[in-house]
Image: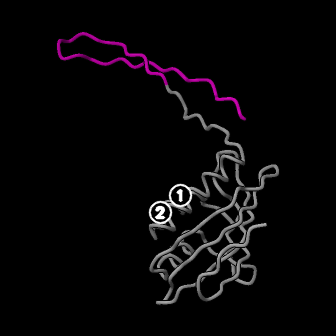
Amino acid sequence: MRPAPAAKSASRTVSSASGGTNTTSLRFTPPIITAVTTEAAAKRWIDGWLRGWRALDPEPVVALYADECFFLSHPFREHESPREYVKRALGEEEWAEPWFGEPLVDGDRAAVESWAFVREDGKDVTLAGTSLLRFREDGQCVEQRDAWAVEEGRIERREP
């Protein structure tokens, strides 16, 4: 975690309506960016995807990503911004029941299994996949690479 920079002080002299002066001390305190563990960032990522996907609302999902995030929604697709992908994907769905597994964490990276029952274009499908994620110190996702499969109908996840 980076130490917070020292606060800077300044003063200003203000003339009052009665003709006197008043010196006010101003103190500038920069925002403190708190380091987030990768596990906490991955759990926040899961929560944001659950909320956004269930509601078909891209905003809780888009908020998880840094502006410069490298986002690859499938191994054979071109890179696109998280906002472009999420707006397009959720816009194709009528409803969704997503599930995410516990994140597997190593350093600044996490792997998360996902499973979802979705209705797209009037058809029920099952999506199953894995997201490989990398987070920066503030918890924003800076890289995501997904691999997934889709099958028609509702297929339950197999337990070990």
**Residue in view at x 61 percent, y 38 percent:** 33
Mark 1 belongs to which amino acid? Ala
Depth check, front residue: 104 or 24: 104
Q: Position of residue 103 (x, y in %)?
A: 72, 56
Label 2: how many Cα within 10 Å (few below 14, some 14–19, many 20+): some
* Residues at discs 2 and 1 in contact (Cβ within 8 Å): yes
* The N terminus: image quadrant: top right
Total numbered labels placed on residues in the image: 2
- Is any atom of residue 66 visible in this view? no
Q: Which residue position holds label 1?
A: 63
**Residue in view at x 53 percent, y 85 percent:** 124
Q: Position of residue 102 (x, y in %)?
A: 70, 56
Whether residue 75 is in magenta: the answer is no
Q: Which residues are magenta?
A: 1-27
Residue pushed farthest left?
18
Mark 2 belongs to which amino acid? Glu
Whether residue 12 is in magenta: the answer is yes
Residue pushed farthest right?
106
Which mark is on residue 41? none
**SS type, badge 2:** helix
Q: Position of residue 157 (x, y in %)?
A: 68, 73
Is 12 displayed left or right of 44 in the figure? left
**Residue in view at x 47 percent, y 63 percent:** 59
* The C terminus: image quadrant: bottom right
Q: Position of residue 10 (x, y in %)?
A: 48, 21
Label 1: how many Cα within 10 Å (few below 14, some 14–19, many 20+): some
Structural distance between the alpha carbons of marks 2 and 1: 6 Å
**SS type, badge 1:** loop
Q: Which residue position holds label 2?
A: 59
**Residue in view at x 64 percent, y 28 percent:** 5
Residue 86 against residue 123 in the figure, above or below: above
